[in-house]
Image (cartoon, rainbow, N blue to C red):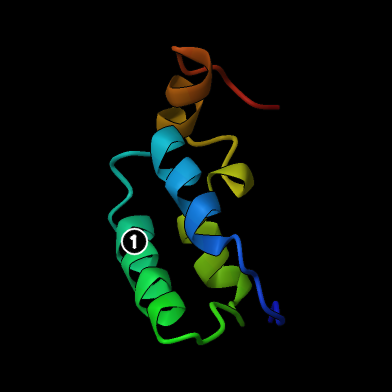
Amino acid sequence: MAAGRNDDAVKLFQEGLAADPDNAALEAYLAQCRQARDLDRPTLPSTLEQELRINPFLRAADPAVQRAYLGEARPVS
């Protein structure tokens, strides 16, 4: 489990959506983070399972993420 307080979570997840705009899980989590920030609550902890769904940096092999960064999908070895 990742724990702590991340005051930049909303900004980071907005950037993540730019890289992975069709990620419904990320969009939903961004909404949760915005609500948490509005209530002055922490946006963490998180789990690795959740991060694998929402964090494009952990999904470099995903063709959708590759297209967002590279303009095309490439095999990752």
Q: Residue furthest top?
A: 71
The residue nearer to you, when weighing 38 against 36, is 38
The amino acid type, in three-letter code, at marker 1 is Ala
- Give the class, few, some or many, for how many residues have Cα within 10 Å of label 1's Cα (few <14, many ≥20): few
Percent position of residue 67, x then y: 43, 21
Residue 77 picture quarter: top right
Q: Is residue 28 above or below residue 46?
A: above
Secondary element under disc 1, as helix, strand or loop, is helix
Q: Residue 38: x percent and y percent?
A: 39, 78
| Image quarter (top left, top right, bottom left or bottom right) of the N terminus | bottom right
In front: 43, or 1?
A: 43
For residue 28, which quarter of the picture?
bottom left
Residue displayed at 64% across by 26% down: 76
Residue 12 % position (x, y): 55, 51
As drawn, 33 above or below 53: below
Name the residue rendered at 61%, 82% in the picture.
Answer: 45
Q: Which residue is mark 1?
A: 25
Q: How many marks?
A: 1
39 in relation to 48, above or below: below
Residue 18 location, quadrant: top left
Tell whether 24 sits left or right of 42. left
Question: Which residue is found at the position 55% from the left and 70% from the top?
Answer: 49
Task: In this rendered view, identify the residue nearer to me: 75 or 44.
Answer: 44
Of 14 and 38, which appears nearest the observer? Answer: 38
Q: Is residue 17 left or right of residue 27?
A: right
